[in-house]
Image (tube, rainbow, N blue to C red):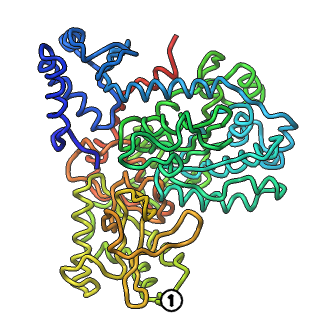
Amino acid sequence: MTATVSDSFLPDQLARLFARLDPEHGPALQPLLQRLLAAVAGGHVCLSGLSGDDYARLRRSPLAGRAGDYTPLVLDEGGRLYLARHWQDETQLVAALTRLARDPQPLGGAIEPVLDALFGATAAGDWQRLAARLATERRFMVISGGPGTGKTTTVVRLLAALAALSPRPLVMAMAAPTGKAAARLTESVRAAREALPVADAVRAQLPDKAQTLHRLLGLVPGTARPRQHAANPLPLDVLVVDEASMVDLTLMAQTVAALPSHARLILLGDRDQLASVEAGAVLGDICSRQAWRSDTAQGLLAAGVSLPGVIDDSAILADSVVVLQKSHRFGADSGIGRLARAVNAAALDEVHALLAQEQADIRLQAALPDAAGLLAQRADYWQALAQLDEGAEDWVPLFAAFNRFMLLAAERHTVAAINAQIEAELERLGRKAAGSDWYAGRPVMVTRNDYGIGLFNGDIGLTVMREGRLRVVFPTTDGGWREVAPARLPEHDTVYAMTVHKSQGSEFASVWLALPAAPSAVLTRALVYTAITRARDVFVLAGNPAVLEAGVLNAPPRQSGLAERLWPQP
């Protein structure tokens, strides 16, 4: 969990440091420092909305400098106050993305026949094909879109196009911010790459597994910087980063800095999902606008395509951001899809109307059932567990049964209470021994990266009995399985329910969202949208519609300078 100002020793340490570095003005800056730290703990990169008195205090102190000064605090021209580290990360990321976007690397050869073979005879307004076409000409491409819009399918075909058009074999890699997201990306890409109508030499260049960004960069806790950086870049030609909405400012800056000078970067993600737990909303800032070069726009307009954004040849990210709109998972009559779109648009009348209708895939209920009722939702999982042979090697049916249902909540304390209630019911039924943490069937989620064991924050494992001993089974990113003794696990939680933040990168057949009893700062439009779009077949909202309405209207922007610097207004 991200530390808040009140539960960390850091503010006191910084207060003493500021007083020592600037005895005259340091103490007067302490309230402003507390506000800045609180903003960072809340996911903001900087603090804006400073008063005239704030400016005066900052200008008098040598602790705060202008952009580029070597000071602990930086006050930029837009009136935003940064910790120096975050200002440096943002500045380096802007510079790196600008270099990527303004360094076109068009591939030679007959591009259209290659795209025809991969995408078929599609209409001129097919945004999947357009994204691939643009990516063959540039070093930076962002493909955003909601669930089912074909981001993974597009990127697999795009990678095949790059491989087919390149005069030499390409080294490609895929990464995601969590192990769970990396495993899901691996599964999706493997399924798609085998169906491609390409030569074996092209297919062989496509990556067959993804890894976490931390592992890719060699980020180890306690070290000053990652193993891969500007002076020791990644040996890659193409890097794909999935679930980019979950990547915070610092991690994205480190990732882009580690690319060699010729490499291409492709970001995938849903710009409307929850932003990263740490500071920044990088994907949202990058996708805050769209712009097109004149020649691209002319071709699309001539084909009758409705063009989002503006025509601006001078825009840094012109032709670099494509947002896919058509969902192949949620059709026009899908209640889940319509509800997600209505929430995203803050269309409250439509939200209430959809929930009031009797639809097969969305439902509103006043409250959650009791623990026995929640446990009944997992009947398939317990049946699959009971049918397991102790010598089993295939865990797909067990994980498939587990993933048929997930209960989500906005707040950690709600999740902890629900998990405790379910485990108490398991004790009553005799499936769990009183006073024991471990039992067959316990699902756990890793909450801290452990590079020695190879388990990462967000990985989900299921506890099974193996030869008279309990083992926790985890899927691996190469499509296999690994078994770990419970005593060897890093920090973890029971996960019959999870927070919406932890659910990112996952998909479940049926999802229930437990609303808090009263409106909460944690319950935001992005959180509700993210919860809805975790569901494939059924979404159930449990709680007061008035609380839902407050959440949909709660859409606080994250404070940063990234969007303004990437999309400067004339």
Answer above or below: position of 196 versus 245: below
Q: Is residue 236 left or right of residue 205?
A: left
Residue at numbered disc 1: 391
Q: Is residue 36 left or right of residue 314?
A: left
Residue located 77% across and 36% down the image:
124
The picture places residue 235, in percent across and down from the top left corner, at 64, 44
**Residue 323 appears anywhere in the view:** no
Q: Callout 1, which amino acid? A: Gly
Q: Are there few (<14), some (14-19), or many (20+) residues within 10 Å of tag 1?
A: few
Answer above or below: position of 62 versus 345: above
Picture quadrant of residue 480: bottom right
Residue located 45% across and 40% down the image:
251
Picture quadrant of residue 515: bottom left
Residue located 26% across and 80% down the image:
426
Out of 419 and 365, give the one closest to the viewer.
419
Picture quadrant of residue 276: top left
The picture places residue 382, in percent across and down from the top left corner, at 39, 82
Which element type, helix, strand or loop, lies under badge 1?
A: loop
